[in-house]
Image: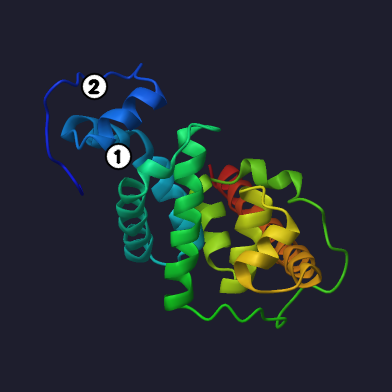
Amino acid sequence: MPYLLSTKHYAPSTKTTDAALVAACRQGNAAAQEQLYSRFAPKMLALCLRYMRHEFDAEDALARGFVKVFRCLHQFEGKGSLEGWVRRIMVHESLSVLRRRESLTLSIEDCYTGHLAADLPAADVELQAADLLRLVQDLPAGYRAVFNLCALEGYSHPEVAGLLGISEGTSKSQLSKARAVLQRQVIALHSSYSSSSYAHAHVA
């Protein structure tokens, strides 16, 4: 944990407000910093994992992100939630690590060229979270970045264009193609599950 200095004058609690927690962290209080890390680290690691193919890269992004969180806490003005502010930092750090690990060239190979679904099919609700994470991780880096930013983080296409240095049209195109690839893979995976269940039922 970075910047752990003092444990005085602070009693950590699950009911601590964002403002009180931030104030204590700014004073270099170790217990407050540990509480902030513990409160957000699991969610933020899950976020980082969606951008990275490998867990050690996600952990790298998480560590870099928290260093920046503690270094920049003085910039948090209390407008909006602390979690949202931390999340934005983690997104930026994930993209930074992703750029160093993989090419963000937005590919068009092996794309589904038929109907581009607006959302994943209903079959996805029957899949395990780990399976869905793997499908997202298996996307080409450019697709993965755009899909995470637009579909999962709620960034607008102008915002994504600015973050990735692409046009709004390219952002929209990559999102549609990423969804189409995921749709095809989800349907295939769901069919595989259904076949396995059918075979197991008849063997039993």
Q: Secondary structure at mark 1?
A: helix
**In the rendered view, does 101 fall on the left or right side of 152?**
left
User: Relative to 46, is 25 above or below?
Assistant: above
Q: Looking at the picture, how far across and down is residue 41, in whole percent? A: 35, 42
Front-most of residues 11 and 152: 11
x%, y% of residue 176? 78, 64
Where residue 30 sits, quadrant-wise, is top left
Task: Kindly identify the amino acid type of the residue bearing the numbered disc 2.
Answer: Pro
**Residue denoted by label 1:** 37
How did the renderer colour the structure? rainbow
Please name the residue shown 27% across and 35% down the image: 25
Q: Does residue 189 appear in the picture of this structure?
A: no
In the image, is 193 to the left or to the right of 101?
right
User: In the displayed structure, does residue 110 sit left or right of residue 70?
Assistant: right
Pick the residue in front: 41 or 164.
Answer: 164
Q: Amino acid at mark 1?
A: Tyr
Residue pointed to by mark 2: 12
Q: Residue at x 73, y 69 (%)?
A: 174
x then y, percent, for residue 19: 39, 25
Residue lying farthest to the right in this orientation: 115
Looking at the picture, tell me which residue is in the foreground, 203 or 184.
184
Q: Secondary structure at mark 2?
A: loop
Q: Position of residue 190 (x, y in %)?
A: 66, 53
Local crowd size for mark 2, using a 10 Å CA cut-off: few (<14), some (14–19), many (≥20): some
Q: CA distance from mark 1 to mark 2?
A: 12 Å
